[in-house]
């Protein structure tokens, strides 16, 4: 779920000045600092009330019965509202981008250009499972549309693939009755 939020937030913060890729030092790896530097160039979102909608577009798992796929669709497809304060909007997404990688997940690609993002993250688990996520989408200071494709080993199932779409839309000023 952390990656779904990160992808949506990254898309929300797009409209960047442009980037030739986050691997600024050309060493073949993208460090947390290089991701943060790319995020620093992104336009900051506007403060306000947002609606986020996540939809499971497809789910493929070997031997998964149709009811399991529908259960996943129901669990992963949802909509909610949140308030982005002026303080959070002023921070942008630099710190969140810096913290997005850990020992189990690393960006292989993090390109931002003219409101578009094209990123690839590879993750590995302690039991040998591997997951690769591609994120492609676009955004403005008031919204985003991101498609994420996660492909890899599903514990106990084998190779699988999940495609999700996340949209964030600024719908007005913050509603004091809705908490983030």
Image (tube, rainbow, N blue to C red):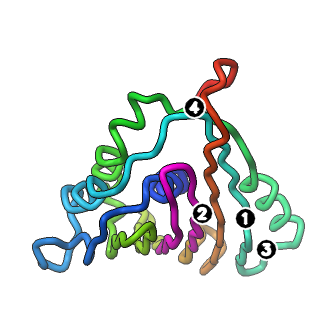
Pointer 4 residue: 83
The residue tagged 1 is 56
Q: Inspect the magenta stretch and tell me whether residue 135 lies in it.
A: yes
Q: Earlier in the sequence, mark 3 or mark 2?
A: 3
Q: Is residue 137 magenta?
A: yes
- Which of the marked residues, 1 or 4, is nearer the chain's N terminus? 1
Q: Are marks 2 and 1 in contact (CB under 8 Å)?
A: no
Asked whether residue 141 appears in the rendered view, the answer is yes
Q: Is residue 113 left or right of residue 152?
A: left
Disc 3 secondary structure class? loop
Q: Nearer the viewer, residue 20 or 152?
A: 20
Is disc 1 surrounded by few (<14), some (14 to 19) or many (20+) residues within 10 Å? many
Measured from the top left, where is residue 119 in percent x and y?
41, 72
Cα distance between the residues tagged 1 and 4: 24 Å
Residue bearing the label numbered 3: 64
Residue extending farthest to the right is: 67
* x and y percentages locating residue 83 in the rendered image: 57, 31
Circle 4 Cα neighbour tier, 10 Å, few/some/many (<14 / 14–19 / ≥20): many
* Residue under the image location 62 percent in, 24 percent down: 179
Q: Name the residue furthest top.
A: 176
- Image quadrant holding the C terminus, namely top right
Which image quadrant for residue 159?
A: bottom right
The residue drawn where x is 85% and y is 64% is: 70
The span shown in magenta is: 132-149
Please state the horizontal and vertical placement of residue 35, each as a whole percent of the image.
27, 60
Residue 43: numbered disc: none
């Amino acid at each position: 779920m952390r990656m779904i939020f990160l992808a949506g937030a990254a898309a929300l913060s797009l409209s960047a000045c442009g980037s030739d890729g986050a691997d600024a030092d050309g060493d073949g790896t993208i460090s947390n600092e290089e991701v943060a530097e790319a995020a620093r160039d992104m336009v900051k979102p506007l403060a306000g009330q947002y609606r986020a909608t996540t939809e499971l577009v497809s789910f493929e798992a070997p031997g998964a019965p149709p009811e399991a796929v529908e259960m996943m669709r129901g669990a992963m497809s949802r909509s909610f509202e949140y308030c982005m304060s002026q303080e959070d909007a002023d921070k942008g997404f630099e710190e969140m981008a810096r913290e997005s990688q850990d020992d189990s997940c690393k960006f292989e690609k993090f390109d931002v250009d003219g409101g578009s993002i094209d990123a690839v993250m590879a993750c590995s688990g302690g039991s040998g499972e591997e997951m690769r996520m591609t994120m492609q989408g676009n955004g403005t200071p008031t919204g985003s549309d991101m498609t994420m494709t996660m492909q890899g080993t599903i514990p106990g199932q084998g190779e699988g693939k999940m495609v999700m779409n996340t949209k964030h839309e600024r719908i007005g000023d913050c509603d004091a009755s809705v908490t983030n």
